[in-house]
Image (cartoon, helix red, strand yellow):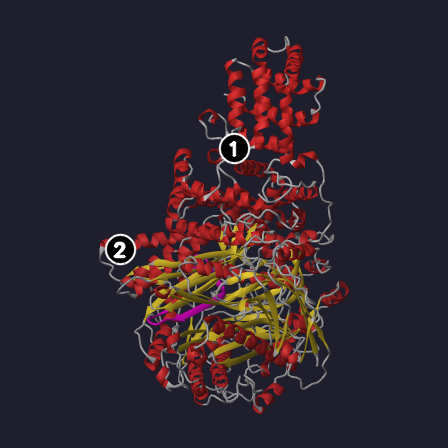
Amino acid sequence: MSSDLDVFVGNTTLIDEEVYRLWLDGHSVAEAVARRLRGGVLEREGTSVAVLQSDTRDHYRTFQMLERLLHAPPRLLQQLLFQIPPERQALLVQRYYAFDEALARELLGKKLSKGTKKELDEVSARTGVGIRSCRRQFDNFKRVFKAVEELRGPLAENIQQLFLLPPALARDYAAIVFFANSRFETGKRRLQFLSFGDFAACAQSMMAHWSQGALGTPKTPKKPQNPQSMMAHWSQGALGTPKTPKKPQNPQSMMAHWSQGALGTPKTPKKPQNPQSMMAHWSQGALGTPKTPKKPQNPQSMMAHWSQGALAPEAAEPDGDLPKSFLQDLKELKVLVSDKDLLDQHKSLVCSALRGKISVYNELEANFKALSRALVNVGGKLTHARDVRDFFVDLVEKVIEPCRSDKWSPGDLRLFLTHYTAAPRNLPGFRHQALWERYMAAISACLLRMYHD
Amino acid sequence: MPGKLKVKIVAGRHLPVMDRASDLTDAFVEVKFGNTTFKTDVYPKSLNPQWNSEWFKFEVDDEELQDEPLQITVLDHDTYSANDAIGKVYIDIDPLLYSEAATVISGWFPIYDTIHGIRGEINVVVKVDLFNDLNRFRQSSCGVKFFCTTSIPKCYRAVVIHGFVEELVVNEDPEYQWIDRIRTPRASNEARQRLISLMSGELQRKIGLKVLEMRGNAVVGYLQCFDLEGESGLVVRAIGTACTLDKLSNTSAFLPACNSPSKEMKEIPFNEDPNPNTYSSGPSTPLKNQTYSFSPSKSYSRQSSSSDTDLSLTPKTGMGSGSAGKEGGPFKTLLRQQTQSALEQREFPFFTLTTFPPGFLLHVGGVVSARSVKLLDRIHNPAFVGIMGNTRSYKLLDWNSFNSDEPETRDAWWAEIRQEIKSHAKALGCHAVVGYSESTSICEEVCILSASGTAAVLNPRFLQDGTMEGCLEQRIEEASPPGCGFCHIPYDELNMPFPAHLTYCYNCRKQKVPDVLFTTIDLPVEAIVVGKGCLIQARLCRLKKKAQAEANATSISNLLPFMEYEVHTQLMNKLKLRGMNALFGLRIQITVGENMLMGLASATGVYLAALPTPGGIQIAGKTPNDGTYEQHISHMQKKINDTIAKNKELYEINPPELPEEIIGSPIPEPRQRSRLLRSQSESSDEVTELDLSHGKKDAFVLEIDDTDAMEDVHSLLTDVPPPSGFYSCNTEIMPGINNWTPEIQMFTAVRVSRLSNINPTNQTLNKNFNDLCENLLKSLYFKLRSMVPCCLCHVNFTVALPEDELVQIAVTAVAITYDKNQALQANKAPTEKSQQRASTDNEEQLQFPLELSSDPLSSQPFSPAKEALEGASSHTGIPAAQRATSVDYSSFADRCNSWIELIKLKAQTIRRGSIKTTTSLEKASPLAEGYLRHRSVPSGTNSTVSVVKMTPLSFLPGAKITKYLGIINMFFIRETTSLREEGGVSGFLHAFIAEVFAMVRAHVAALGGNAVVSYIMKQCVFMENPNKNQAQCLINVSGDAVIFVRESELEVLPAPPPAAAAQPAGSAGDVTT
């Protein structure tokens, strides 16, 4: 007597966290049942394997139906098909978008293309993450990347709004998008000691200090809009979009893409809609969530973030791209190393400030010029895409490795960088003080984070 | 123009991409009502169109308003080819037609397509301006309220309960029309959905008219069903109970009523004929000349069958006819005029209610049922016999040959069965049938019609105009004690309709009670129950030869009595095994398939304090000389005894014992002594016209003389009790649990299994079927393990045999959590001294299970539910389950006649003491009135999807229903031609059921509601053709949309006795009625 058909549907959709985890990890139903058996459910609940199988299948079906919605989390909030309490929705989204850092580390800076996806088998073998899970995570990265690459405003906040992720997770995704966009080289052998966390922290400081948004200049006046008019706005926007041959790029069409799981949307250079309206819309929709003040990661707190995000000043370019003008300006800093006088004065200022304070004073004195040259030139090269890729390689090769071989302590490096950054203030004839400090803020943060074994 | 319907299409969202080139959609909307259609503008290139249309206005008759659904179609505009339909929304505007319900329907509705499922959502606003129509000849019945709930709805008071209303409409099934050959499956499905929607509307309107004629204003316990008869058409039928309801709007109006005792009621003494005219049936029925005054069952049965013959030979005697367009005949009109409110003059004194206001139910006689086998195709072209399959290729029918004389045929069929039920009730000395329901099972051209109910004696005061003031708040403070009155026999002890074993009531010691009571109703609130209840199921398969038409019908007819008997025996055994003595909510389903019949009976067993303690089950061997055999027998006996002991502990059945001399057994039991089996066994006598092999034997002495009996014993023991922390029942409330917490989870589970045996026997089939049900239950317990401690309430199994070897079981139930720690506190609620004494008595009794069971549940041995349940009622109850089966089909004059199975049980075992309770609900009423101070719904109008709760119960734990918004009655068809791609049969059905839930929720939310109560999935017809990668499913659901407010959110109330607070169904609601 075999069951051909066996379903269980609750008015409130049942979500079993354990089974969700197994599903996310890419296990088949049979594997999941085996694992649950090992987990001892049978003994605890005194049930049969058949019951467990049927239960697992039910959950898997539910997750498969939910997956479509998870690709566009705001839809999960609006859909009518599954009645899921808000905290459960948040959990679903969060777990779906959570990733293995080892995998993310492997993919950092790689183009999120089909080619890369084909290499996932090897990545899976290296990282021990199941291949199905690898693919899902890769698709997540790609989906997030596609969704935000053309948007203006702070990356992390855009991601948070579009995917309803908790802030920390959104920041990690922002880092992944940032790396994928700038294609930083991270795979070199000498970079292997750096973890995903190191890179993510670097990306965050770079975005924080260098991006357009960091300057705090609101480029467009904010308009309070209600969601209705906004939806109208989008659609009208869609009408008037200067189209590249095929695809009008507005959020709606994006949603359409998501819902189909079609991810191959080509970019269009310009978009008519403003992201703010989108934020406003989604935040608005989200603010209606019944308030449950207990959990930090419920939609509500997420919403709080979005609404703040919605108010944040807008930037002209996506944060994923570093502002061109800024990079161009960095060339001006070369004067610090090209002008012999400035270089000498800089050195003497730093050295006098650090004398007796750091243990590696002699090495500092000997290497100052080389270090300074390296630090300034890294910035100077950033205008060329090819050189951008080598940003981290350069930092490690030209700064971190020399320091490490001279046995600088992290404290030494910190002191040095503080004074090195501050010194030009007292340099006569150096006019790029603000630029310099903005540049060095991110560089210092990156170096300090990366300076470990 | 008595009505103006206004519709506004606001917006759509998440539409599917209809234009592959642009990945967008150019959507517009058609709004259709009756024959008028409006269109919105095309909203180009958007998946979230903002139509913001003008108000589309339809000026229509109210008749049309009642019949027609509003049909909203979303389409994709296409310049060059035909516009593509995205999907549809049907909105039943009936809730807008009576003033107290919803005023506007507004919200997001899923756009539904029968092939693709839900495809986006549309925001619609609907309003109705209704002009009063004073025309007394009108055909509409706007304003009559409908409730699926089978009790008086919580915020209403029953002024008069008028009685039974029924109607049916017949149409041809669009799926079987010639045009179906040339139209798309989508068009065919939509035609069907629309037709059923239309027929439902028409049916509701006609029933409404009948209610108005009876001077009622509402239908309670409205049950509408579809019979998909294939080629012979589509029958939509409905039954309900007409009532005059009063809205309980303020407490001042309520208070005086509840305090005024009705004297008339008290004056009805026990054993006086409570209803002098009862025993003559309606003057114009064919049975009018027969007298039924307490005739013994045998002669009664004969009469019954002869009357049936009359009926079937002359099917147009006028009874129950008058559907489908015709307004009855003058004959019927005459009948109606005579049908005044007095029960005895009614055509059918039936009530679909299962819960009643206190005092309404005087005595309960037992279950009455009737079945009849009919051939569907007799009036049609015989060439097409037996092709009612799902395959479209057969539809070469000429529909002109089928015509509309069918309603009369169907009406006559049902009238026949109802007549029989009525006669059975009379034989039990009862003038009414409560908890009445009807069902059908169709396979090919054979149809089994079934009806069942509980024979009862009612308080006539509730049934008449004029005397209603205060009568529902009747309190009986002397005379017959409450809590046991309904158990007392309604018939004359010296002139019993069947041999039965009677004892004096263990509660009041004044009246006679039977030793076992079977009913189809819910446990009356006032009943005194010991321990907890549990779900009891009897499951049975019987093979049958494949046959055609009449031969088939004959073989089914021959099998039915045996099945009934076996189901009954199983129920009785299982009841004994649990140490209980009464069944409530009994529902016996007989399903017919091509090569077998299946019987599934579900009920909730309880221990009624008023009835005697059941004895054990004795096993006897036929071959006493064999030593090993003896050993085996004694081993079995030990197992059974152990199980009974375990069950008693599990369900906390520990009735107080009383010295034996107090009770005198009025009826000597000679047979008891003559048997070798000693001690506490019981016996049961079946008196039936059929000479069943088991006849005249003690039912509870299981003689193991063949493998069959072994099977029986084994199957008794294989029923696994639910895991700890779980209870289950199929009634509204679980006896013994009253401290519900608000968390509920309604669910539907469907399983289709293949019976893989090549040469199946009855035994293997039984085992398979049994396993299937048990596994399904097990899997439910596992699924819901996170809710422990909880109770599965209103567990409703539906069995279908879609194909040769397939068995489909659908279960809908609700899991409700309860707080096991609150019970003790609740116990302290002082209601009545005697009750307290009762509870302390019981606590003393129950101390021993504490150490036996580590389960903390047993720490509150005497649940306060009982206190809440003890209420007013009056005297005299009835024993014995009487069931009767009438099997016939119109072609055969000699049918396998009706039989009544009467069961007498006796037990003389541990005597229990009575709990002296002279209780009134006075204490409870003022507090219940406190609940009536409703507050408006908390403003939940957020842009996120609002939560809508669904439950098959008539209440929500921990919440107060403040408003009924109208009936939800929806019918959906889903079909796929890409079954594999949608995840196979399971994926397909899973998605469809989820979609149905979503659509129900959306409709409720649009009405402004936040819950559906009395939700029921009446039909789930699933058909697949894996070879063609196709499947089709039809689902019909209904329920009442309501607004509820959490009790914690209500304004400050006088501290409610926890029992009442925790049991809104039991106390609050009924007290207020």
Q: Which residue is mark 2?
A: B630
Tell me where residue B296 sits by quadrant.
bottom left
- B744 vs B91: above or below: above
Callout 1: chain: A
Residue extent of the magenta highlight: B574-598
The residue lying toward the viewer, choosing from B545 and B829, is B545
| Magenta stretch encompasses residue B585 | yes
Task: From the top left corner, tell me how far across and down residue B432 is, in percent.
Answer: 55, 76
- Do we see residue B618 in this rendering? yes
Mark 2: which secondary structure?
helix
The residue lying toward the viewer, choosing from B952 and B345, is B952
Mark 1: which secondary structure?
helix
Residue B968 located left or right of residue B809: right
Residue B468 located left or right of residue B534: right
Q: Which residue is mark 1?
A: A386
Give the amino acid type for the residue marked by disc 1 in the picture: Arg
Residue A283 located left or right of residue B516: right
- Disc 1 to disc 2, C-alpha distance: 94 Å
